Image (spheres, rainbow, N blue to C red):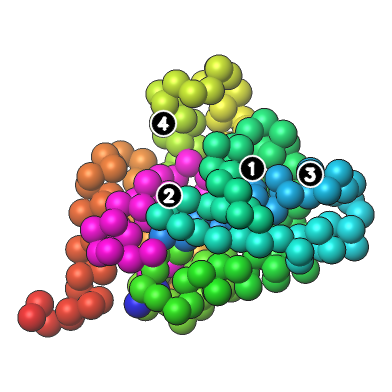
């Protein structure tokens, strides 16, 4: 079974996807992390992100593996480096390169395609797994997403700065020529603005149970 979850930055989809994967004993694949790992590799190749051929050569040679929910790039655990400022600064630009998206999509399909999995990102429900068994679009207002990030206390920016940054990332995500953030017509849409993580989880989990066992057997 493939469960695909898309949504904008800060909508809580990574937390929910991880919780659902754990509850069901499914693999969990965060496609944003793979874009981040690719970005890390490209920075190490010391390539210019606007040199598409060099970017692709470097990306195609990357080895990406998921083990125990951790991502290994060329055999190295890179989880602690994926959210660094240097990756943040260029990952949106890198993820907008259409042939680079094909490389990442192939990794996501290879990891998730042979097992039950929860996959999350921006185009899992529309491009990568259009035939997923269960599709969700998790949304939240930019105000509530900014407030969640602010309350996590890991970011030294002001609430207003965080909200501006979120709105800028939304604009980039929605305007990509390929793989832009869209609501799949057959996705279950959930606005989590006024909800706790547990409330969102209960709704998503309930929907999955219903899809797996429509008659409640
Ligand atoms: O979810 P995130 O912030 O870790 O994603 C990192 C970047 O990758 C962000 O710029 C959006 C992009 N992304 C994408 O274009 N397609 C996906 N399926 C997942 C992430």
Residue 112, horizontal then vertical, whole percent: 47, 71
Residue 138, horizontal then vertical, whole percent: 41, 54
**SS at badge 3:** helix
Q: Nearer the viewer, residue 174 or 85?
A: 85
Can you tell me whether the CB of the residue at mark 3 lies under 8 Å from the nearest atom of ligand 1? no
The residue to which callout 4 is attached is 148
Question: Given this view, does label 3 or label 1 mark the residue nearer the observer?
Answer: 3
Q: CA distance from mark 2 to mark 1?
A: 16 Å
Q: Nearer the viewer, residue 120 or 171?
A: 120
Horizontal side of 204 relative to 169 (left or right) equals left
Determine crowd level at label 2: few under 14, some 14-19, many 20+ residues with C-alpha closer than 10 A.
Answer: many
The residue to which callout 3 is attached is 44
Question: Given this view, does label 4 or label 3 mark the residue nearer the observer?
Answer: 3
The residue to which callout 2 is attached is 14
Residue 99, horizontal then vertical, whole percent: 77, 68
Q: Which mark is residue 169?
A: 1
Q: Residue at x 54, y 43 (%)?
A: 79
Horizontal side of 58 relative to 29 (left or right) equals right
Image quadrant occupied by the C terminus: bottom left
Residue 61, horizontal then vertical, whole percent: 76, 64
Question: Given this view, does label 2 or label 3 mark the residue nearer the observer?
Answer: 3
Q: CA distance from mark 2 to mark 3?
A: 26 Å
Q: CA distance from mark 3 to mark 1?
A: 24 Å
Q: Earlier in the sequence, mark 4 or mark 2?
A: 2
Q: Earlier in the sequence, mark 4 or mark 3?
A: 3
Can you tell me whether the CB of the residue at mark 2 lies under 8 Å from the nearest atom of ligand 1? yes
Is residue 45 positioned above or below 178 on the image? above
């Amino acid at each position: 079974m493939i469960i695909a979850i898309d949504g904008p930055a800060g909508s809580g989809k990574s937390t929910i996807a991880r919780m659902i994967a754990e509850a069901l004993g499914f693999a969990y694949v965060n496609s944003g992390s793979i874009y981040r790992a690719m970005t890390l590799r490209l920075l190490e190749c010391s390539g210019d992100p606007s040199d598409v051929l060099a970017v692709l050569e470097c990306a195609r040679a990357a080895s990406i593996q998921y083990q125990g929910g951790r991502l290994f790039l060329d055999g190295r655990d890179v989880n602690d480096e994926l959210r660094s400022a240097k990756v943040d600064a260029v990952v949106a630009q890198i993820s907008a390169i259409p042939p680079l998206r094909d490389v990442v999509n192939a990794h996501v399909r290879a990891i998730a395609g042979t097992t039950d999995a929860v996959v999350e990102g921006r185009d899992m429900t529309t491009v990568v797994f259009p035939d997923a068994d269960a599709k969700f679009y998790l949304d939240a207002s930019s105000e509530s997403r900014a407030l969640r990030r602010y309350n996590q206390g890991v970011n030294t920016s002001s609430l207003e700065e965080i909200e501006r940054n979120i709105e800028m990332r939304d604009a980039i995500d929605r305007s990509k020529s390929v793989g832009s953030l869209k609501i799949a017509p057959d996705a279950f849409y959930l606005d989590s603005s006024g909800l706790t993580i547990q409330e969102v989880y209960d709704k998503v989990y309930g929907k999955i149970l219903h899809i797996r066992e429509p008659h409640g057997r």
